[in-house]
Amino acid sequence: MRYLPHTQEDIKEMLAVTGRTSLDDLFDTIPDAVKTKDGLNLPDPLSEWDLNDHMEKLASDNIACKGYTCLIGAGSYDHYIPAIIPYLVSRSEFATAYTPYQPEVSQGTLQGIYEFQTMVTRLLGMDIATASHYDCGTALAECALIALRKNKKANKIAVSDLVHPSHRQTIETYLKPTGYEMVLIPHTTEGVTDTTALDGMDDIAGLAVQSPNFFGHIEDLGAFRKVADAKKIRFIASFTEALAWGILKNPGSFGADLVAGEGQSLGIAKSFGGPGLGLLAGTSKLMRDLPGRLVGRTKDTNGKDGYVLTLSTREQHIRREKASSNICSNNGLNAMTAAMYLSTIGKIGIRKIAQLNHDKAVYLKSVLTGAGFTPVFDTPFFNEFVMKAPKDFAQKRADLINRHCMFAGLDLAQFYPELTNHYLFCATEKVSRQEMDQLAKEVA
Amino acid sequence: MTRQPGTKGLIFNEPNVWEKSREGRCAISLPRADVDTTPLDPALTGEAPDLPQLSELDVVRHYTRLSQWNFGVDSGMYPLGSCTMKYNPKTNEVQASRQGFAGAHPLAGDECSQGALRLMYDLETYLAEITGFAGVTLQPAAGAHGELAGMLIIHAYHAKQGRQRSKIIIPDTAHGTNPASATLCGYQSINLNSGEKGILEPEAVAAVMDEDTAGIMITNPNTLGLFEENIKEICDIVHAKGGLVYGDGANMNAIMGVVKPGKIGIDVMHLNLHKTFSTPHGGGGPGSGPVTVVEKLIPFLPVPRVEKDLDTFRFITDCPDSIGRLHTFYGHFGVMVKAYAYILTMGARGLLDVSRLAVLNANYIKESLKGTLNLPYDRPCMHECVFNDAHQKKHHITTMDMAKRMLDYGFHPPSVYFPLVVEGSIMVEPTETESKEDIDQFIHAVKAIAKEAESEPEKLTRAPVLPKVTRLDEVSAARKPCLQG
C-alpha cells in the first residue's frame, strides 16, 4: 500500500522495541469481548487507475459533468473561478497544515486569514469579521443565539420569511433544545419583508433579514434598523450572494449589529452545496460574543510583526462548557480561497462583475417576459428574480435539461406552496446572451 | 548524528496585500459584454468595497510567499496528538475536482444528481460498516458540528421518551468541544475524573449516573491514548438508567477493523473525515463530521437523508422525529468525495493496517522516549502517547520551550498542554504514514533537545530561531486586539 511506508523489517524492529511479537499484540489492552470478530466488509481496494475510472463514472452520473447552463442560484452560485485560485489554494503548505496553534510556523495561514478578516470587514462595512464559519445557515443560527443570549428579557427571534428556507430550518434546529423560539416576519406583495408586521411582535431579542432576499430583491435594510432601534433589539442582516456587495450599499452602512453570509460566490466551487464559506461579522461591541476563531496582529520577541489566534478565552478549548460556541474547525481553506479571489478581482473587478451579473439578470428577465412569462414583482433585484411561468413550462424545463443541459430556474412551490408555477431565476457573468436567447426561443 | 530536517533557507518578506495595491490594477479577465448595461437605482448602490488592486503576478507572488511561511504535512512530520495529521493523498484532490462533482449545483434535482447521491449513500454504508452502526448522516460540517448533531439526537430521543433530562457526564480527558456541544443543548456538564490507570472506572460512572442524566460523552481511545477497557460495563450502567452513550470518534484511527463502537454499547458517535479518512485539514477546515447511530436513533437523524429505491437514489425530508436541518445543503460534499476515494483505495485490509501501524508507531515512540520525557501513564497505548515536562522542570524548561525548540529541528511539535488531566502534557500522535526513518529522526531530535535542556537551556528558552518569526506576544494580542488592517 503506497501510503504505508513500513517494510516487514521495520515492523519487526519496531515491535521488538515495544516488546511485542505481533501487530495483533498491540491491541492486548482491548478486552476480547470488545474486539470485532468479523473484520470489515468493504469493496476490494482499487488501484489509482481503477479509482479514476470508477470516480469518472460516478461524476458523469451528475449532469454537471457536461458543462451545463446554470440559471439557478438560491444559495449556490455559478460564478467563474479564475485559474490562479485553485492553483494557489492547492499549495500544500496551506492545504495540509492544521489550525495555526504554532504561530511561528503558520504565519502564511495567519496573515492570509487576517487579510481575509480585513477584506470581509471592508466588503460588509462591519468592524470585525471572524476567521469563518461553516456556511451562512450555521453562521445565521449563531447570530440568532448571540442576539437571544444578549437580551435577558426576550425569548424570540424574528426572522423574515424571505430568508433562505434552509437557513430558517437551520435556526430552528439550533433553537429547538434551548427553549428559544423563531417567529416569521411575512412578506408584502412587493416581495420584500413587511416591516409593519413587526409592530405587534413582542418578546423579541432580534430580527434577521436577508438582502438580496430569497426572491432576489434588495431589502430596505435602513427600515429594519429603525424598527430594531425602536424596539431596542439587535438587527441581523444575512445574504447568500456575496458579490452583491460589489455594487449595493453594504449592511454595515445601515447599522447592522451582526451579519451572516455565504461566501461561496468568492472563488469557491459549488460542489453540490459544500464546503462553502460562512461569513460572520459584527460590531466591536459584540467582539467577545462572536463564535469561533479570530486572528490578531502582534509582535515577536524581536519586535517584528506577526499574527496569532487571539481572544481564545471565548472558545471551547479554554472555556469548555462556558464557551460562546462549540465551533473548532471552521472553513479555513475556503476563507483563504475567498481572500485570494477578492485580491484577484479587487476594487475595480468586483464592481464590474457585480454590474455584469445585474445586467445579465435584467436581460434574462426581459427575454423571458417576451417569451410569455409574467414578471411577478417590480422590485429592484441583483441577479435573481421570480417569474410566473406559462402553463406548459414544467415539461419544457425538463426537455431543456435533457436536450441542452440547461437548468431554467428553480420551482418555488417546494419552498412557498402558494407560488405554484413560479420560478426563481439567476443569471451570473457566466451565462451568455446566446444561451438566454435560446432559452427564450425554446419556451416561447 | 542523524542529520535533522530543519535548516535555514531563503524566504521572503511580504507586506499585507493592501500595501501592494496600486490604483488601477486588476487581476481578472472579464467576459465580453454582450448585453446592455442597466444601472441600479443610485439610492441602492454604494461605493465599491476598498479591496486591493493588484496584477495577476502580484497575487500569485503574494500567496506563494505566504505559503512558504507555513508548515504542512507535506513539509514534515506533524505529530499533533488527537489531530491525526496523516498524509493527504493527492489523487483524492483530483477526484473531488472532477467537473461532475465540483460543478454540481445542490438544487439540480435528484434525477440529475444520481452520481453524488450514490456516492453519499455508499459512503454512509462504508462508514456504518467500519463503525458497526446502523445509520449515518454525512451532514455535519466538522467534528464539533457532528458532536452538536449527536447531542441534539440525544436531546430529541429523551424528549420523545416524554421526559427531558438535565445533565451529561463528561470525563476529564474530553475534548473541549464536548462540554461546549452539550451546553448548546442545555445540558449541564458533570465532570468525571479518570481513575489511576488513566481510564474511567465503572464505579465512578455508577456514582454519578442517575435518571436525570441524559448520558455520557466518551472518547475512546481517550485523549491519553488509552483504550477505555471498561467501556462495556460503563455503557451498561448508563443504559440501565435510561441514558445514552455518546462516542467521540476523533480517535477512530486507532481501531479500524479492531473494534466496532456500534457493537459494544455506544449509541451515537461522530467521525472526523479530516482525521481518520485522510482529507486535508486546510489550516483549520473545511472538515466533515459524519454521525453514526444505532437502529433506535435513526428516526432522529438530520434531514435531508439519502434513500435508495431499487437502483435510484433520492433525498427524503419526511422524517417527523428528525432533529431537522444542520446545514444549508447536504454538508461538505467535496470532503466526502475525498474520504470515499480513500476508503476505496485502502479496502478492508488497508484500513486495518492503518490502525495497526498507527498504534505501532505510537508505541515505538513511547518506548523510545520514556526515559527522556516523563510518561505519567506507562501503559500500552493506542495511536498516541502523552508525556510531560516533569524531568525538565528542574532545569526550568517547560513543555512550551521544548515544543518551540522542535520547530528549529524541523518538526511540528506535538499537541501541548492537552489533555488537561496531565500537567504540561506533550501528546504525540505520529500516524501510520510516517516511516521508521522519520520517526527515528524525531526521537533523536527530542533526545537532543532534552540534552540541551540540561546543558544549554537558553537554546530552548530562546527557541525557535529558524522560523520567519520568533515567539509572538499573545498577551498583547488579546489585550489590545487588532483584528483587521
Image (spheres, coloured by chain):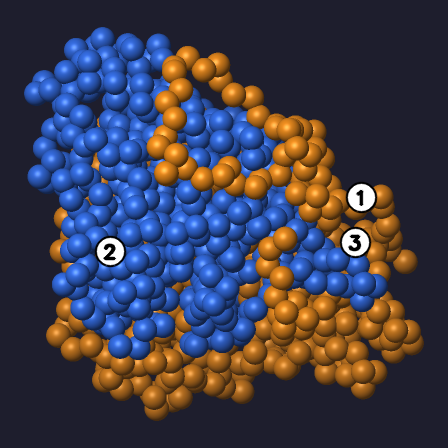
Q: Quadrant of residue B51?
A: top right
Query: Where, quadrant-wise, is the N terminus of chain B in this rendering?
Result: bottom right
Three-letter amino acid code at the position of disc 2: Val
**Chain letter, blue in picture:** A
Q: Are marks 2 and 1 in contact (CB under 8 Å)?
A: no
The chain identifier of the residue carrying mark 2 reads A
Say which residue label 1 marks: B12
**Residue plotted at (62% across, 39% down):** B52
Image position, residue B199 (x, y; %): 49, 79
Mark 3 surroundings: few (<14), some (14-19) or many (≥20) residues within 10 A: many
Is A25 rendered above or below residue A217? Answer: below
User: In the rendering, what colour is chain B?
Assistant: orange
Residue B471 visible, this angle: yes
Q: Could you say which is closer to the camera, residue A171 or residue B483?
A: B483
Badge 3 marks a residue whose secondary structure is loop
Three-letter amino acid code at the position of disc 1: Phe
Q: Are marks 3 and 1 in contact (CB under 8 Å)?
A: no
Image position, residue B29 (x, y; %): 56, 21
Give the mark toward the camera: 2 or 1: 2
What's the mark number on residue A159?
2
The chain identifier of the residue carrying mark 3 reads B
**Residue plotted at (36% across, 13% down):** A433
Distance between the alpha carbons at the discs numbered 3 and 1:
9 Å
Image position, residue A256 (x, y; %): 39, 56
**Residue plotted at (21% across, 10% down):** A442
Q: Quadrant of residue A37?
A: bottom left
What's the mark number on residue B468?
3
